[in-house]
Amino acid sequence: MGSYTAEKITDKVYWVGAIDWGVRDFHGYLTSRGSTYNAFLVIDEKVTLIDTVKKPFEKEMLARISSVIAPEKIDYIISNHSEMDHTGCLPSVIELVKPEKVFASTMGKKALASHFFFDDDVITAVGSGDSISLGKSSITFVETRMLHWPDSMVSYLDTEKMMFSQDGFGMHLASTERYDDQLPSQVLLEESEKYYANILLPFSPMVTGLIKKLAELNLDIQLLCPDHGPIWRSDIGGILQRWEKWALQKCSLKAVVMYDTMWKSTGYLADAICDGLQSQGISVRVMSLDSSHRSDVATAVLDAGALIVGSPTINGQMFPRMADVLTYLKGLKPKNLIGGVFGSYGWSGEAVRDVEQYLSDMKIPLAVPSLNVNYVPGEDDLLKARELGIAVGRELKEKCGE
Ligand code: FEO
């Protein structure tokens, strides 16, 4: 099966997941540092597998399980989340293991049936507050609907004080290190922020609810175990606080100037707008779509108070790459932003109109009238662009109460 070994986490829990060093495109999200698919094996009277892995990594997971116990000895499988990076090999694992029970939430049972055409008796549905005994330990389930799928739930293993949080508090990061304190804090911050921005942002109100619910449950969590990235053992409070902060998307004196350009005209305007914003004390990220992936733009927007967008017109429309990124951002529903629009054109200038429509759909009010420049910006145009930046900066400061 290959040389893969389980990693002991506690006396009775092993990490038996898989490391995906090479993945870079996770349905549109640039996973620059790869990912892990975490699965956990609990050794008790009822041997229990918590989550599985993406289908191509099935052998890796089974080899890691086999380094502890024969997979056929697994009694229970828990599926916290039905998305196929955690369930792709579930049908074949069920076939191999023939577990006594497979647990999922009520919505999870439906989702798994829709994915894998399971008979009704394959999955046992559990709800919030339900517990199962594994022998000496027990697991309690808490549904976390829409975090980030309707089926999502988390599982708490009492004797080990471990919370298995599926995608929650995770990040895409391939590593041989299993714990947060073994990895550079800057990498953890970058990747968890990127994960939040690209996966959780549209569900921020539910995130706020979950953090509150976890506090109310008053569980003693010593190990927070997501399905991607490291296990949190040193900074559980920190990751909860960061999620809480990101969910609020409070007003911030930061701006993202995102643009695409054909012959640099829109690029010159972007630089002048940046200069104007800077003159107002605003921290600016200028992101050319030539070198910025949509998922990196989304991460920058999470932390911003203003989004200023520029596109040239090509064939009577905005640039296709801009339409891509705006479509992506629109779906993520960022909140609490003010906007600005600029562009350049030859004989028609529809890109500005197209971008304005997107910002309107995203409920991002324009702080200033848009700037649309014919061909190459002259000194006057660059001054106007700088003034646009100054005006957005002033409005942002006023909004943030500065
Ligand atoms: Fe990692 Fe939503 O799956």
Image (cartoon, grey):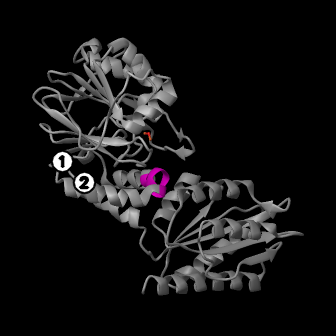
For mark 2, what is the residue? 214
Q: What is the magenta segment's predominant secondary structure?
A: helix
For mark 1, what is the residue? 221
Q: Is residue 20 in sight in this rendering?
A: no
Residue at image location 53% in from the left, 87% down from the top? 394
Residue at image location 27% in from the left, 60% down from the top? 212
Where is ligand 1, by quadrant? top left
Q: Quadrant of the N terminus?
A: top left
**Front residue of this view, candidates 401 and 279:** 401
Q: Is residue 145 above or below residue 279?
A: above
Say which label, 1 or 2, has the lower sequence index: 2
372 relative to 189 in the view: left or right: right
Q: Quadrant of the C terminus?
A: bottom left
| Kind of residue sitting beneath label 2 | Leu
Quarter location, residue 43? top left
330 relative to 260 in the view: left or right: left
Residue at image location 40% in from the left, 28% down from the top? 53
CB-based contact (under 8 Å), mark 1 and mark 2: yes
- The percent position of residue 298, horizontal first and vertical second, equals 53, 58
Circle 1 residues within 10 Å: few <14, some 14–19, many ≥20: some
Q: Is residue 271 above or below residue 110?
A: below
Secondary structure found at label 1: loop
| Kind of residue sitting beneath label 1 | Ile
Where are the magenta residues, as a range? Answer: 196-202
Residue at image location 29% in from the left, 61% down from the top? 241
Name the residue at the front extreme. Answer: 120
Give the CA distance from mark 1 to mark 2: 10 Å
